[in-house]
Amino acid sequence: MKVRKMEPTTVAGSPEPEKATTVFSTITQWLFIFGIIAGIYFLGKLASIKLPTLNLQPYQVIILSFSFAFTWVYIFRWGSVKPFNCVTCMSGWFSLIIGYWCYGWWGIALMPVAMTFAALYSEIRMRWL
């Protein structure tokens, strides 16, 4: 009786270049954003620059953060992966930054409100616009 060896039908190869470039792009975007934030922070410490206080109402923080996120995602088209291409995610991040700037730690409470507002917009846009 002759024994036949089974040849594998698929062979594991090197990763696809599209996936490798996507990962590299994501890491580059995150490093770029963190670099900008760190640069602004250390430049402010070096030059002892104080940020001006913002006197915005909570609804103004929510609208401003949504406007920044909309501009970031749909106008400039910065970013290719989440959270940089998601209006809801970017609205949350912008509201976190602006809310903290206006109200201190109490401004963090505006983040879920802004994300809910942006999520409602996204659903309306996806279904009816």
Image (tube, rainbow, N blue to C red):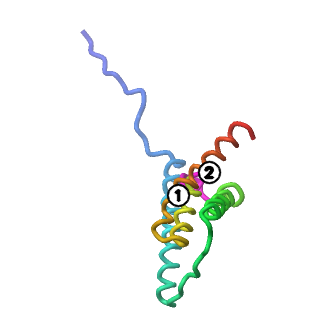
Which residue appears at 61% of the width and 50% of the height? 117
Q: How many marks?
A: 2
For marks 1 and 2, the one nearer the N-term is 1
Query: Mark 2 falls on what kind of element?
Result: helix
Tell me residue 13's x, y (percent). 43, 41
Return the residue at label 2.
Answer: 118
Type of residue at label 2?
Ala
Look at the image and say whether residue 81 sits in the magenta stretch: yes
Q: Is residue 16 above or below residue 27?
A: above
Give whichever of 82, 115 is nearer the camera. Answer: 115
Left or right of 127 in this view: 96:
left
Q: Residue furthest front?
A: 57
Residue 96 in percent (x, y) is at 52, 63
Q: Which amino acid type is marked by label 1? A: Met
Q: Quadrant of the C terminus?
A: top right
The answer to whether 64 appears left or right of 25 in the picture is: right
Q: Residue at x 27, y 12 (%)?
A: 2
- Nearest the camera: 14 or 63? 63
Rendered position, 105 above or below 17 = below
List the single residue furthest toward the left: 1
- Residue bounds of the magenta highlight: 78-88
Q: Is residue 76 above or below residue 8?
A: below
Q: Considering the image in quadrants, where does the N terminus appear?
A: top left
Toward the top, the furthest residue is 1
Q: Nearer the viewer, residue 8 or 69?
A: 69
Q: Position of residue 43 (x, y in %)?
A: 51, 84
Q: Secondary structure at mark 1?
A: helix
Q: Which mark is residue 111?
A: 1
Query: Is disc 1 surrounded by few (<14), some (14 to 19) or many (20+) residues within 10 Å?
Result: many
The residue that appears at 40% across and 38% down in the rendered structure is 12
Tell me what residue is drawn at x 61 percent, y 53 percent: 87
Helix, strand or loop: magenta stretch: loop
